[in-house]
Amino acid sequence: NLRCPISVIMGHVDTGKTKLLDKIRKTNVQGGEAGGITQQIGATYFEQKTLISQTTRLNQTENFDITIPGMLVIDTPGHESFTNLRSRGSSLCDVAILVVDLMHGLEQQTIESLNMLRKRGTPFVVALNKVDRCYDWKVCPDAPIREALEQQPEGTISEFRSRSENAKLQLAEQGVNSNIYWEMGDDDWENSDFVPLVPTSAVSGEGVQDVLLLLCQMAQRKIWRQLMWHANLQCTVLEVKQIDGLGMTVDVLVVNGYLRENDRAVFCTLDGPIVAEIRGLLTPPPSREMRIKSEYIHHKEVKGALGVKVIGNGLEKVMAGTPVLTIQENDEEEDIKAEVMSDLTNLKDKLSVDKLGVMVQASTLGALEALLQFLREETNPPIPVSAVGIGAIHKRDVTKISIMNEKGKSEYATILAFDVAISPEARTHAQEMGVRIFTAEIIYHLFDQFTRFMDNLREQRRQEAAAIAVFPSIIKILPQHIFNQKDPIIVGAEVVEGILKVGTPLCVPQLGGLHIGKVTSIESNGKEQETARKGSSVAVRIVNETNPTITYGRQFDSTHCLYSTLSRQSIDALKENFKDKLENEDWRLVVKLKKVYNII
């Protein structure tokens, strides 16, 4: 008594995962996907008869008897920042399809996915996709791949050969033995670490039958023990969604066991476990995906493996990626609650939020988790997050984050909204409160928008602060290079310490802080420059607007060193905006000058 194996499609962005799934499913999700990247976990169930009808042409030569009752394919997102969703996908699955772009070979994410599959010991097939991109490929729609290859001209075959050898080599570098599946001997099949390669085209459908048949073969030959059906409920939440007319629903994947209407189920939320009665179990019609709206079918009970939508009360806060258990007659309710919560306790660390930071709002918990991980780990520097939320953005969210303006961190008065709706009141309120809302349907676009904004802001602040911020410097006048003694004073000078910058006010602390004037230009070898660093000798032009009569040789001379005039405000402005422009020794000079000017 076998259950349906759960299979998952993994691979690098843009290798054609969803297209391949579409081809298997003959529907079109990809068109409706943002940026062509799948971002909601969907599940598709294939009945046994669908599998048989899809592989008939190939089976005339293979003669393989399909005994599994069907197959469930999870369509996992495939971008780097979705590793945590993906390891979710990987942990739920029995067999996998790893999509490799024949034209590009292995890419970073493909290797990540590979390592994840091997770590979990999941058997997988490698689909060498985009075979139709080989030069002069003759399209044979939906044909088994060997039939298609027989139709190809010599040149195409040799290009295909060299590219697939290349892919084999790259896989070997990762420590994976692989071979084109019909060239594998019986020993290779028995030898469990050999991975079959299937050339496919997601566009015209060559080789799709082969992938399906191979998955069935693997399920039946290698992991049939894992597929023995048992009555203990194994069930995981894929996603929580608001559906018109049904309220909050939970998409779950029942791997084993039964779920029945009126069962008391335990779910996991951020605020602790909740017990809810299951009011309804819905499945989409066969061979359609759970994300595309079509009429649902109601069930009294479902048997794994199957993706179902659960209706119940109070499910708003249920979190994706957590287990679901039901309470039977002689179960201890507390034990079950503890078991359901065990995963969250590990997750809790990921969702912790900072005191100052932006607000992140996403459509589902999986997306939120992926987004948070992305902001914390993949971005440099990490973007702090002070509040998180799931679902549409309302006026109260805007009010909540506008506090950042009052805290003097206006750049964090920002909402990063991923794939969620924004109510009109929230938009107008945001404009009044000075809150920015960045929206995107792809995580890394959101990040790009925010970093671009931060860079512009930093630049703008620097320009505003340039007038106040004074760079620390001490310069010594070279007495043999006096070009003009007063109004303007033009002298040759050596920078003893720090950074001399155009606009720096200079004074002589030895003479009670006598103000000499502002540096209006710096020249070195006849070329003007903005700054001069320690050790350089330059010509300096100093203008004193308040006291034009100040004269070199009368009020001061080369025995006096000239210092930058610092104040508390100028030091603060330096710290805020120019931290990266000063070296450690420059900061030490700031400390030294603070003592000279008695700045606390």
Image (cartoon, grey):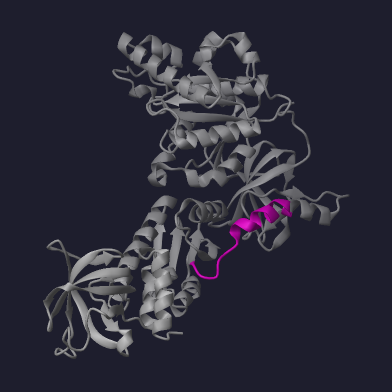
List x then y, in percent, for residue 571.
Answer: 39, 77
- Prevalent SS, magenta region: helix
Q: For the magenta stretch, what is the residue range?
A: 341-357
Task: Inspect this view and state whether residue 15 appears.
Answer: yes
Q: Nearer the viewer, residue 320 or 141?
A: 320
Q: Is residue 142 left or right of residue 299?
A: left
Task: Inspect this view and state whether residue 435 appears.
Answer: no
What residue sits 60% from the left and 56% below the top?
350
* Number of numbered labels in the structure image: 0
Quarter occupied by residue 543: bottom left
Outermost residue on the right side: it is 330
What residue sits 33% from the left and 85% below the top?
509
Q: Indicate whether 572 appears above or below 274.
A: below
Q: Nearer the viewer, residue 218 or 410?
A: 410
Quarter of the image for the N terminus: give it.
top right
List x then y, in percent, for residue 73.
Answer: 57, 34
Q: Nearer the viewer, residue 221 or 527?
A: 527
Q: Indicate whether 337 appears above or below 180.
A: below
List x then y, in percent, for residue 341.
Answer: 73, 54
Q: Is residue 251 left or right of residue 411?
A: right
What residue sits 63% from the left and 55% below the top?
319
Q: Indicate whether 512 appears above or below 154.
A: below
List x then y, in percent, for residue 200.
Answer: 44, 23
Q: Is residue 292 left or right of residue 283?
A: left
Q: Residue 240 in magenta?
A: no
What residue sits 64% from the left and 19% below the top?
192
